[in-house]
Image: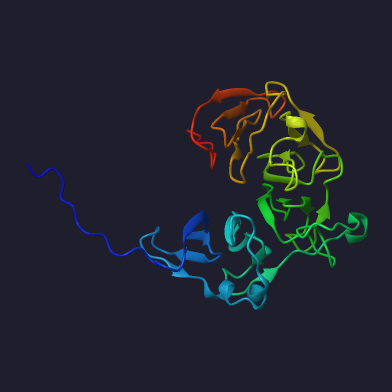
Amino acid sequence: AKLFDWKPSPPAPFTGEITALWSLGRAGDRLYAGSKPATLLASDDGGETWEKVSSLSDHPSAVEWQPGAAGLVLHTIVADPGNPEKFWLGISAAGVFATEDGGATWDRRNRLSNAEACGHHDHPAAPRDGQTGHCVHNMVRADGTGDLLYQQNHHGVYRSRDGGRSWDDITEGLPSTFGFPVHVHPRDGATIWTLPLNGDGIGRYPPDAAAAVWKSTDGGESWEAKRAGLPQDGCYFTVLRQAMAGDAADPAGVYFGTNSGSVFASMDEGESWDEVARHLPTILCVEALET
């Protein structure tokens, strides 16, 4: 018996041009996707058809973009809920880009506000020439009407109060400059979480092989390690850039997954943690579904 009425699908768009989709985001009624190699795609019909946003691909700086360890990827799309014409992109390793006209034009925003305080580093991803390192790993926007952004970079954690036009290095107090995820509180833009890892020379696992989510309640001016419920001996997992998320409950829940297949949850804004799943495949992405 014929159970299904199968029909051939049309060829996948951009076959041979892009190798993976890394991110999805919505600005107003328009859907955006970021890919590898770094390309921004847009859809006005809910994803039925897509077109390239050529204004980004044709940006004058594009000839300078360099791949990170995972390739040249557009991995983060951050929208302004109050303005569908305004959003930000994170590209590894090209940095942060912003548009305020729906993608017609783009501004590359990697300037450091405290460049002198950052000192000199020999690492190729470190800040130099008055700019953050261009290998941005993740970026989030605080809720509200302002332009408060945070990013976890290959080399440091940064905060911007002006929509990325300038960035403050807020890494001081953390045990390492390297990490992938960063998450911001759904109501309090001064409360953020990140999960530092050792960098390239040692291995991408928590410092001292003891897991800790680091929390700041003052916008990154100070940090405190939250270890309760997390493995403190022989911990060699990695938490990838999209593998930390939160909900809008009160108190806010925070969640992260690991490349060793565990999921940890906190119901008290990161103060304590429980392992709620294990033995899964590598966790690439975590999202909180609210009903």
Give the quarter of the figure containing the N terminus: top left
State the image quarter where residue 80 is shown.
bottom right
Depicted 187 relative to depicted 253: above or below: below
Which residue is drawn at the image coordinates 50% and 27% (left, top)? 279
Identity of the residue furthest to the left in this view: 1
Residue 42, x across and y down, in percent: 47, 65
Identity of the residue furthest to the front in this view: 201
Q: How many marks?
A: 0
Depicted 54 relative to depicted 246: above or below: below
Which residue is drawn at the image coordinates 62% and 46% (left, top)? 241
Q: Nearer the viewer, residue 155 or 150?
A: 155
Residue 105, x across and y down, in percent: 62, 74
Residue 159, x across and y down, in percent: 78, 52
Which residue is drawn at the image coordinates 51% and 60% (left, top)? 35
Q: Is 212 left, or right, of 256 in this rendering?
A: right
Which coloring applies here?
rainbow
Depicted 196 relative to depicted 228: above or below: below
State the image quarter where residue 232 is shown.
top right
Residue 244, x across and y down, in percent: 61, 39
Q: Nearer the viewer, residue 147 or 55?
A: 55
Q: Nearer the viewer, residue 36 or 112?
A: 36
Q: Is 138 left, or right, of 283 in this rendering?
A: right
Which residue is drawn at the image coordinates 54% and 39% (left, top)? 286
Depicted 234 relative to depicted 257: above or below: above
